[in-house]
Image (cartoon, rainbow, N blue to C red):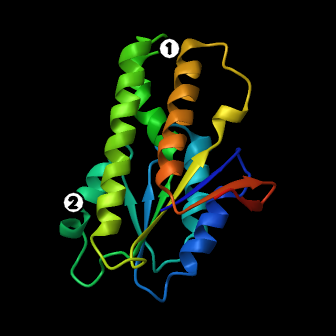
Amino acid sequence: MILIIGGVKSGKSSWASTLASRRENIGPITYLATARAGDDEMKDRIRRHQADRPSSWLTVEEADNPAGYFLEQTSAVPAGLYPNTVLFDCITLWLTNILSPFGDEPNREKALALGEKEGQRLLQAVLEWEKGAAEGVRETLIVSNHVEAGLISPWPLGRIFQDIAGLTHQMFAAEASGVYLMTAGIPQKLK
C-alpha cells in the first residue's frame, strides 16, 4: 500500500496514476472513486478525472463503503479481470461522505468514533486484499488531501474532519510501504 497525500491541486491523483500505470504489465487496474457529483463544479472535476484515466482501467464508484469493495470485489469483477492494482481516490472525499449526515455541529465523540471505526475497517480490508496474492502482486495506491497541515477550522465539523483525516492518515502511513507528500506536482518520498 502506498499513501499519497497533498494539498488541493498538488498533483496527488496524477502521481497516483503514474504509479498505477507502471504496474499495468502486472495486471488490470481499478480506479475506486469516492466523489459525489453534488454540484456543477464537482461534476466538472469528476469529468476531468475520468478523461485523464486510461480507458483500460475499470472504474468503480463507491462513495460510502470502499471497504466493502475490497472485501467483496472479486465477486463483482468478471473472471480474468481481477485487479492487481487499485487506485483509491480519495480518503478525504470518503470521510466527507460519511461525516456529512452528522450536520454542521455533530456530536464530537460519535463522529470521531465513527471515523476511527470506518478508517480501521477500510485499512484492514485493504491489507487483507493485498495479502490475498503473492507478495507485490496486489497494491493499493491511496490518495488523500493533507488537511492536517492547514489552519484549524473555526467550525466544529471542520475540526472533527481535520482530526479524523489526520488520524486516518497516521493509521494508513504506519502500515504503508511508501508514503508520498505532493507539493506543486513534485512527489516527496516520506517513507
- Residue 72, label in figure: 2
Counting from the top left corner in percent of width and height, residue 157 is at 53, 18
Counting from the top left corner in percent of width and height, residue 121 is at 31, 43
- In the picture as drawn, the residue positioned furthest to the right comes out as 184
Check disc 1: other Cα within 10 Å, few if <14, some if 14-19, many if 20+: few
Position of the C terminus by quadrant: bottom right
Could you tell me which residue is drawn at 53 percent across and 41 percent down? 170
Q: Which residue is mark 1?
A: 104
Whether 23 is drawn above or below 114: the answer is below
Could you tell me which residue is drawn at 30 percent across and 54 percent down? 125
Along the viewing direction, whichever of 139 and 10 lies nearer the viewer: 139
Separation (CA) of disc 2 from disc 1: 33 Å
- The secondary structure type at the circle numbered 1 is loop
Can residue 37 be seen here?
Answer: no
Could you tell me which residue is drawn at 35 percent across and 27 percent down? 114
Seen in the image, is 70 located left or right of residue 3? left
Can residue 61 be seen here?
Answer: yes
